[in-house]
Amino acid sequence: MFELSLALRTLTIASSLALAGGALAQETTSEAPADAAATTESQPAPDQGLSMGQEANTGPQNYVKQEFDSWQLTCAKVAEGPEPCQLYQLLKDQKGTSTAEISMVALPEGGQAAAGATIITPLETLLPANITLQIDTAKPKVYPFTFCAPIGCVSRVGFTKAEIDALKKGAKASMTIVPAAAPSQKVVLDISLKGFTAGFDAVALENQPAP
């Protein structure tokens, strides 16, 4: 129905332009002087006043620069300067459904956080339940959501150097979220640590400030 309506609207606009053009032609013919050639040259082009458009600016384009087992080093193409990169993994549930994603960057030394991560979960996530992260058998930590957008609900997480070292040495990590439609249930997503050490070192090297 939408396509049909759009087609009809396009036809209507095209017909209006055609009728306008025909009316202009009739008016020109009725008032045409003897020197028709000279009059034709002096008249404006039929497409005068119409915008021909221009290419839209879609912003930086992301691409996979390198893969490290379960992790990807993704970077954004920019016109000038160094390309910003991040370490990325798509998280799936037990049925293999893509459910969430995590991206991570190394932070400059001197701060409490050695790395920052952005976690995106579905919009149907129960926000008051927060996000729970656990590395191997370490005590789980809870992180709040920051905001929600059309792409999903976002949590911005900081990792200490000790936690990054644990991720490098760890066997597995997990993330737990709660669906809003079933508050009594929990969805546990495995975060593979295969390739994390090489991937994190790579993203830290990519984002080093230029000397």
Image: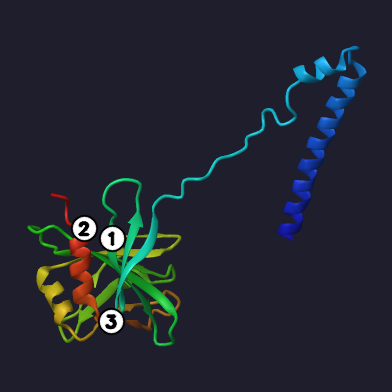
Residue 204 position by quadrant: bottom left
From what the image shows, is residue 39 above or below residue 177? Answer: above
Q: Amino acid at mark 3?
A: Ser
Residue at image position (35%, 50%) is: 78
- Which sits in the foreground, 69 or 171? 69
Residue at image position (36%, 77%) is: 91
- Mark toward the start of the polypeptide (3 vs 1): 1
Numbered badge on residue 85: 1
Residue 137 position by quadrant: bottom left
> Helix or strand or loop: what does disc 2 sit on?
loop
Check disc 2 and report the residue beneath it.
Answer: 207
- Mark toward the start of the polypeptide (2 vs 1): 1
Residue 166 lies, in percent from the top left, at 14, 78
> Helix or strand or loop: what does disc 1 sit on?
strand
CA distance for labels 3 and 2: 23 Å
Q: Would you say 164 lies left or right of 70 here? A: left
Quadrant where the N terminus lies? bottom right
Mark 2–mark 1 CB contact (< 8 Å): yes
Q: Would you say 45 lies left or right of 30 here? A: left
Which circle, 3 or 1, is nearer the viewer? 1
Numbered badge on residue 192: 3
Q: Amino acid at mark 2?
A: Asn
Q: Is residue 106 visible?
A: no
Q: Amino acid at mark 1?
A: Cys
Which circle, 3 or 2, is nearer the viewer? 2
Q: Would you say 27 lies left or right of 74 here? A: right
Around disc 2, counting alpha carbons within 10 Å, would you say few (fewer than 14), some (14 to 19), or many (20 or more)? some
Residue at image position (19%, 79%) is: 140
Numbered badge on residue 125: none
